[in-house]
Image (cartoon, grey):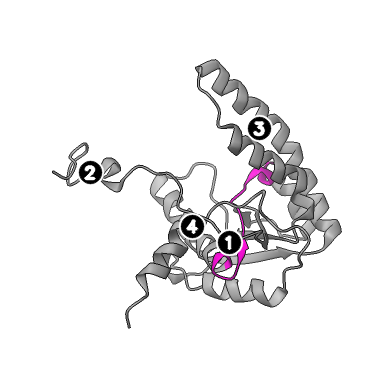
């Protein structure tokens, strides 16, 4: 069976990090979240271990408390990043800052928060190959979840700032010790559907063949 490449490529090239265009007024059905997670769970994992859980938060009070943790991290984070850009004499992309600030201000209003969870934690001194495999066993599923959302008219964004207060979030959510929260994915229907491919360098400019620096001729 062949895929419709036009539609497949449109899905893959227009799945954006959605922040300001999340519909904060439209409820998200639990069945829709589960449908998207069923798609996500088809993603590969190391050794096919599938050592993941998915925390879905649609209770308004709980979302508000998670959002408050996020904002506590956001303020010092954006202050530090702004200083880094200024010290380096590099112009910061104001549209991205504006979009990210909007999400921080409105995260509590996003109807659903989803936290991917790994059922083990990396020890403090871990070798890079193990670390790569560990993250590679859950991030593909999270990305598949975001693609499944997009195909159903919903959007999301990959965020990690609440992890500064991971222990506090774990206590709030009853998450046991020994597991690891990986990210926080705000989920909502999108306002409009006219997403376009982002500006990216052509693959030929960033791809090497057989040896570092060797490009296709």
Instruction: Name which of mark 2 and mark 4 comes first in the sequence.
Output: 4
Q: Residue at x 79, y 56 (%)?
A: 63
**Quadrant in which the N terminus appears:** bottom left
Which residue does the image show at 75% across and 61% down from the upper left?
A: 111
Residue drawn at point x = 63 percent, y = 26 percent: 80
Left or right: 168, with 159 as reference point: right
Give me the C-alpha separation between circle 1 and circle 4.
Answer: 10 Å
Q: Mark 2 highlights which residue?
A: 208
Q: Which residue is mark 4?
A: 14
- Mark closest to the chain's N terminus, 4 or 3: 4
Measured from the top left, where is residue 193 in percent x and y?
58, 61
Residues drawn in magenta: 149-164
Eyeballing the image, is 165 above or below 174?
above
Q: Which residue is mark 3?
A: 77
Viewer-proximal residue among 75 and 69: 75
Residues at discs 4 and 3 in contact (Cβ within 8 Å): no
**x 17%, y 46%: residue:** 210
């Amino acid at each position: 069976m062949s895929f419709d490449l036009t539609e497949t490529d449109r899905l893959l090239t227009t799945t954006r990090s959605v922040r300001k265009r999340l519909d904060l007024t439209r409820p998200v059905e639990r069945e829709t979240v589960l449908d998207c997670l069923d798609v996500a769970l088809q993603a590969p994992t190391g050794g096919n271990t599938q050592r993941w859980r998915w925390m879905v938060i649609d209770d308004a009070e709980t979302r508000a408390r998670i959002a408050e943790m996020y904002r506590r991290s956001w303020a010092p984070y954006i202050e530090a990043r702004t200083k880094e850009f200024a010290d380096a004499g590099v112009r910061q992309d104001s549209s991205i800052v504006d979009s990210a600030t909007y999400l921080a201000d409105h995260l509590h209003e996003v109807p659903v928060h989803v936290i991917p969870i790994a059922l083990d934690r990396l020890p403090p001194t871990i070798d890079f190959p193990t670390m790569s495999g560990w993250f590679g066993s859950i991030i593909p599923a999270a990305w598949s979840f975001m693609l499944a959302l997009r195909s159903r008219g919903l959007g999301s964004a990959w965020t990690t700032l609440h992890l500064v207060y991971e222990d506090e979030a774990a206590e709030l959510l009853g998450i046991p010790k020994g597991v690891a929260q990986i990210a926080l994915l705000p989920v909502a229907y999108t306002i409009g559907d006219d997403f376009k491919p982002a500006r990216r360098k052509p693959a030929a400019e960033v791809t090497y063949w057989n040896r570092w620096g060797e490009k296709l001729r």
